[in-house]
Amino acid sequence: MNELRQWLLEEAEEGYKKFSAGLIPGCDNMLGVRIPVLRRKAKEIARGDFRAFLAESEDLYFEETMIAGMVIGYARMDIDERISMFREFIPRIHNWSVNDCVCATIKLKSEEYQPFWDFLMGYRESEDEFEVRVVAVMLMDQYLIPGYIGKVLAVLDSLCDEPYYASMGIAWALATAYAKFPEETLALMRGENHLSDETFNRAVQKMTESYRVSEEDKAALRAMKK
């Protein structure tokens, strides 16, 4: 960890730190190392004794947490071990950046979809802001496919969307679902659903910001706002 911290200090950029810290509220332990640089280091660690690294991993710096999560995504391991490590990592997530970057790093094989889905459903009733966002973002990243879209929309509709970053994660997932499966997503939005007005409107806003949505459809979406 001392070697890693020394490397982080050498790679840190004060200007990038000021820029990034302004986008991530409450993240006062950031050094200012760019995400692509962190990804390269995580891949390097993942090729070595990543289990020993993760056993020692701490959260002194934002970048340490980010690298640890990325290693879990990049390292070669079976799905049971990845689930176990990710479960242990989730309580370390305290901002949207770590949440979203780590979720994006985890790539599932077709035979891993169901066990990982079962794992995510263990958080379906959670009221924790980032446990909910993990579910929403992982569903968006991995499960917007024909065999799962109906179940994904049902889960997004059922999640606790009161905390801000949970709501934003659900809205983002719904907007991405709309871009890929507009009819199914609109059926949820226009029918009876359990989305708060805030989440509903955030989803609509994100849908209208997409370049993949026609101006005609954007006008119809804006008319749905509550």
Image (cartoon, helix red, strand yellow):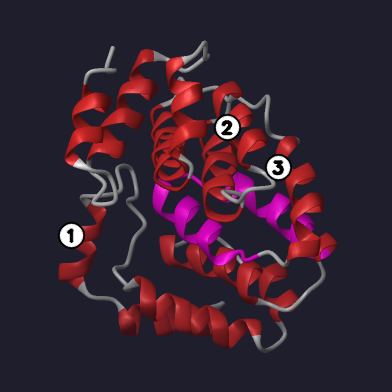
Residue in the picture at 37% in, 22% down: 200
Residue 116 is left or right of residue 46, and the answer is right
Residue in the picture at 39% in, 39% down: 175
Q: Do the residues labelled 2 and 1 touch (CB within 8 Å)?
A: no
Of badges 1 and 3, the one in the foreground is 3
Q: Are marks 2 and 3 in contact (CB under 8 Å)?
A: no
Is any atom of residue 85 visible in this view?
Answer: yes
Q: Do the residues labelled 1 and 3 touch (CB within 8 Å)?
A: no
- Checking the image for residue 120, the label placed there is 3
Q: Can you identify the residue that label 2 sits on?
A: 153
Magenta residues (range)? 81-107
Disc 1 element: helix
Toward the viewer: 96 or 6?
A: 96
Q: Residue 198: horizontal and vertical position, in percent?
A: 34, 19
- Checking the image for residue 19, the label placed there is 1
Quote the CA–CA distance across marks 1 and 3. Answer: 33 Å
Residue 3 is left or right of residue 24, and the answer is right
Three-letter residue code for mark 3? Leu
Residue 5 magenta: no
In which quadrant of the rendered image does the N terminus lie?
bottom right
Quote the CA–CA distance across marks 2 and 1. Answer: 35 Å
Disc 2 element: helix
